[in-house]
Amino acid sequence: MNFNPKSSRKHAAHGWLDYLRESNGLGGVLAKTEDLARLKVLLNSALAKLNLSNLGPKIEAGWRSGSQDELFLIASNASIASRLQQILPSLINELSNSGLPCKSIKVRVKPGPPTWEVKPRLDIHRQEPIGLNEVALKSWESLLEKLEPESGLRPAIEKLLKNKRK
């Protein structure tokens, strides 16, 4: 029997940050996360300069897909979104001064949770059927009369009729 030789185990363990920073691993995810964290810091700084630092925690920021110059701000409610709309030129100017190349900003309102909930129906008044109804009972009895005494189906129908009578 020929077995393949074992592979060399001289590979050194990599730290998890090294793996995250590799371009073919999760490096893209880490880079995007770091960019979003930097964006959030710069946005909070710009809002503080405009005396609106209280809005920072209520806003989510992100770039439009494929574009690094159009910023999306998602506000938690309509009043915050309208206030952001009012200060957009000043906010773009502050972000540009802080080194963030931003040409335009789109503001959207974050959809809220639904106000309704689907609940399972509780059928308290529902009753299990008791026995067979009159039509079914007559139908099974007529079938029993038509069967021959040595039929294999006869005992099953007799048992059904015995257990399911009202």
Image (tube, rainbow, N blue to C red):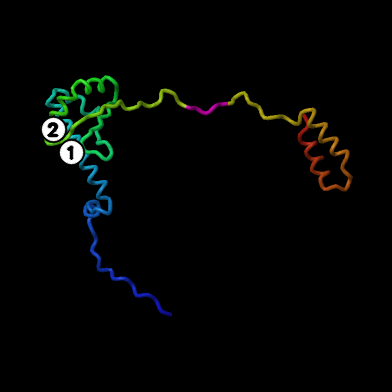
To which quarter of the image does residue 140 belong?
A: top right
Main structural element of the magenta stretch: helix, strand or loop? loop
Label 1: state its secondary structure. helix
Question: Image point 16% across, 36% down: which residue?
Answer: 101
Residue 119 relative to residue 69: left or right: right
Instruction: Tell me which segment is drawn in magenta.
Output: 118-122
| Dot label at residue 38 | 1
Task: Report the residue that reaches farthest toward the bottom.
Answer: 1
Position of 19 with respect to 163 (left or right) is left
Amino acid at circle 1 = Arg
Q: Residue at x 35, y 26 (%)?
A: 112
Q: Amino acid at mark 2?
A: Ser
**Callout 2 crowding tier (Cα within 10 Å): few <14, some 14–19, many ≥20:** some
Where is 164 relative to 156, above or below? above
Instruction: Pick the residue in front: 96 or 61.
Output: 96
The residue wearing badge 2 is: 96
Looking at the rendered structure, the number of numbered marks drawn on it comes to: 2
Whether residue 79 sits left or right of residue 143 in the image: it is left
Q: Name the residue: 18% across, 22% down.
A: 87
User: Which residue lies at the image location 14% right of the left edge and 22% below the top edge?
Assistant: 51
Q: Marks 2/1: CA distance? A: 14 Å
